[in-house]
Every structure is written in structure tokens, then in C-alpha cells.
Image (cartoon, coloured by chain):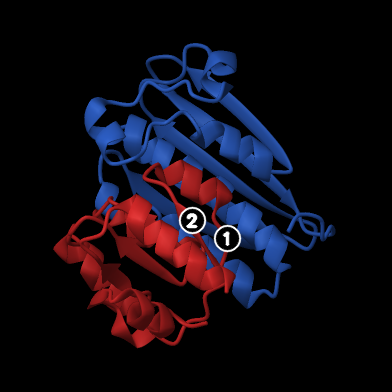
Amino acid sequence: MEHHEFNIEGGDFSRAGYASSQVKKILKQMGVDVGIIKRTVVAAYEGEVNVVAHAYSGAMYVDINRDEVQIELRDEGPGIEDIEQAMQEGYSTASSAVREMGFGAGMGLSNMKKNADELHIESEPGKGTKVVIRMLLNTTTGD
Amino acid sequence: MTVADIVKALDLKVLSGAGGLNREVSGGYVSDLLSDVMGKADAGQVWVTLQTHKNVMAIASLKDLAAVILVSGYQPAENTAQQSEEENIPILGTDMSAFEVTGELYTLIRK
């Protein structure tokens, strides 16, 4: 059982991806299947970028045991009014500044859904969002 | 084929990360939308884009891309070039547009 925590600063794009790169390193060191690492990295990164792009502050909590990797992203931020709408590809509430960087194309959550074995999103508008990504380690499916 | 072979064949400038010129190239991907690259690009590919900020390198590193080609004379931001050096993932420059450089790259890789 391993536990790791990484702070994520809202708005700080210069550090976006740091937590995900640490997760990638840890999974590589553990000898996790490459296909699973690739999918985990996509889901983790999109979750991390969402916190940077939308929230004021947040954190990534990573728990790894023999059977699974669980990545929980918790933030203080505006929350998501309509999760079903947010899940639709192409839907985004990102600012124009964020879009100019090439983010905010409305692909993040669908990338997470495609790559995570399980994805749970809970949100309280005006307070924040909690996203849980679960990756199962005893499968070698995926590319 | 290595990144160095592409630099030579397409007459690209090595803007940073020369330590990674011996990386093997498996193919390419062209997009300026970061989540598109995150979702669709694969390890060993060369990424053609006009985005120059540091998150380009975060993605190149997370996806194990072989190199980044900046089109139309774009230059990497200072912290982008710095991360390219640290990760040994080259950033290459060209005055060609994305259309032109991709066409040449495709022909080269398909040979």
C-alpha cells in the first residue's frame, strides 16, 4: 500500500502535469504494465489540468495497492453545475485565455472516461469537485 | 529513423533538447489542442504544433513523444526550452507551415 499527495495550485499552468508525471514515475518503478500506465497518465493529467484551469486550489491523492491505483482529485472551486453536460465532448466552460493555450476544447473529461477503468465525479456548485479515477492492475487490456 | 535523421532530411533547427536527437521516431501527430494530443498521440511520435508554452513539454514527456516540431517560425518559451533540455526531448523549428512540414514528414516516415 502506497500513498502519495500532491498539491495543485489553481491557475498555475507552469506546474500543470507535475503531479501526473510523479504518478507515472512511481508506477514505472513498480513495474506496472505499460498500457495501464499510459491510460493512468492520460486520466490523471486531464484531472490535474481541470483543477489548474477551473479551481482555486486542490490536491491529488494517490493510493496504490496490489490490485488497483486510485487517484482522487479534490478541489475548492466553482464546482460543476451539470456533470452530465460537462461530460459531453466539446462542452467547456474554460476561459478564452485557457483556450488560447490549446486547453478547454471539451475533451478532458471524455479522455478521462475513455482511459479510466472507473470514474466518479461529485461536485457541489460554489464549493468544489471531487473526482475519483480507479485503475485496475490485474488486467493488461488497453494498448 | 531517429529525430536526427528528420532534422537532417527536413532541414529543421534544433531549438533545444539536442541530447534527445537519437530518439527513435515511430510516427507523427499534428494538433494544437492539448487534450487531443493527450488522448490520441502515442509514444515515439513527433508532435507538430504552434503551441509554445511549457505545457507542451509536460505532454511530450507524459506521452514519451520523440520530439516537438514548432511550425511557421514559432520559438519555444524560455521555460519550455528549459524543460526540453532537462527531459532530452528535442524541440525543432521550421519556417514551414504545419501543412508543409507534415507533408514532408509523412513522406519521409512512410518511405
Give the position of the N terminus of chain A as an image quadrant: bottom right
Parent chain of label 1? B
Sort mark 1 into few (<14), some (14-19) or many (20+) by Cα contacts within 10 Å: many
**In x, y percent, where is residue A132?**
61, 38
Q: Looking at the rendering, which quadrant does residue A118 occupy?
A: top right
**In x, y percent, where is residue B93?**
24, 67
Q: Amino acid at mark 2?
A: Tyr
Which mark is first along the chain, 1 or 2?
Answer: 2
Q: What letter labels the chain drawn in blue?
A: A
Q: Is residue B49 visible?
A: no
Q: Nearer the viewer, mark 2 or mark 1?
A: 2
Q: Are marks 2 and 1 on the same chain?
A: yes
- Residue marked by disc 2: B29
Parent chain of label 2? B
SS for dot 2: strand
- Residue marked by disc 1: B42
In the image, residue A105 sits, relative to residue A13, either above or below, namely above
B33 or A113, nearer to the observer: B33
Q: Colour of chain B?
A: red
Mark pair 2, 1: CA separation: 8 Å
SS for dot 1: loop
Q: Quick check: A47 left or right of A52?
A: right
Give the position of the C terminus of chain A as an image quadrant: bottom right
Q: Quick check: A23 left or right of A64?
A: left
Q: Amino acid at mark 1?
A: Asp
B20 or B108, nearer to the observer: B108
In the image, residue A108 sits, relative to residue A139, either above or below, namely above
Q: Which mark is residue B88?
A: none
